[in-house]
Image (cartoon, rainbow, N blue to C red):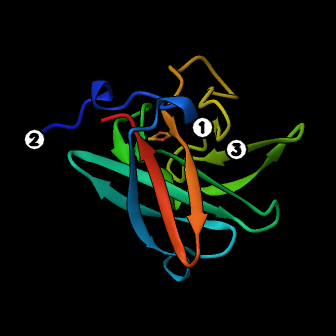
């Protein structure tokens, strides 16, 4: 099946209907990401230890439609958390998915919460 950008749509905290049990905290590298699967979606989840925050976005980079964003470097630009695609360094905001160094379509972002030792990602369906 060819993954399509249409599979991914940003979910805001008030739209969450399902908190998906993604994995224990220990499965996510500090200041790095890992990929999880929910239904037909691949989601990149980031443990931004430096900020003490968690983020999730589509794993699909809209540049060449590669499932790679979970392997991207994370950092900050003007206080905005971002991920850089490991292939050609397009960078996206982890807050709102905006493409920060060009005109690509924004990526979808998802709410994350940690309860106990478990990381949950919020989905609307
Ligand atoms: S595939 Fe991500 S920047 Fe090119």
Q: Which residue is mark 1?
A: 90
Q: Is mark 3 within 8 Å of ligand 1?
A: no
SS type, badge 2: loop
Q: Is residue 22 left or right of residue 100?
A: left
Task: Answer with mark 1 or mark 2, whichever residue precedes in sequence.
Answer: 2
Quarter of the image holding residue 91? top right
Residue ID at (57%, 36%)? 13
- Is residue 53 placed above or below 110 in the rendered structure? below
Q: Are marks 1 and 2 in contact (CB under 8 Å)?
A: no
Name the spot of residue 35 as percent of width and height, x first: 41, 61
What residue did someone put label 3 on?
82
Q: Which mark is residue 27?
A: none
User: Is any atom of residue 121 visible in this view?
Assistant: yes
Image point (34%, 36%), residue name = 65
Q: Residue furthest left?
A: 1
Position in image of residue 3 (x %, y %): 22, 37
Q: Residue at x 60, y 44 (%)?
A: 89
Farthest right residue? 78
Q: Secondary structure at mark 3?
A: strand
Q: Residues within 10 Å of mark 2 (few under 14, many from 20)?
A: few
Q: Which residue is mark 2?
A: 1
């Amino acid at each position: 099946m060819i993954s399509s950008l249409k599979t991914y749509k940003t979910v805001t905290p008030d739209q969450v209907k399902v908190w998906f049990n993604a994995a224990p905290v220990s499965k996510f590298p500090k200041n790095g990401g890992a990929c999880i699967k929910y239904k037909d979606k691949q989601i990149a989840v980031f443990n931004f230890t430096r900020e003490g925050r968690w983020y999730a976005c589509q794993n699909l980079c809209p540049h060449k439609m590669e499932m790679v964003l979970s392997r991207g470097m994370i950092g900050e630009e003007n206080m905005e958390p971002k991920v850089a695609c490991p292939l050609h360094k397009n960078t996206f905001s982890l807050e709102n998915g905006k493409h920060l160094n060009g005109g690509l379509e924004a990526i979808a972002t998802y709410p994350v919460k940690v309860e106990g030792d478990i990381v949950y990602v919020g989905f609307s369906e």
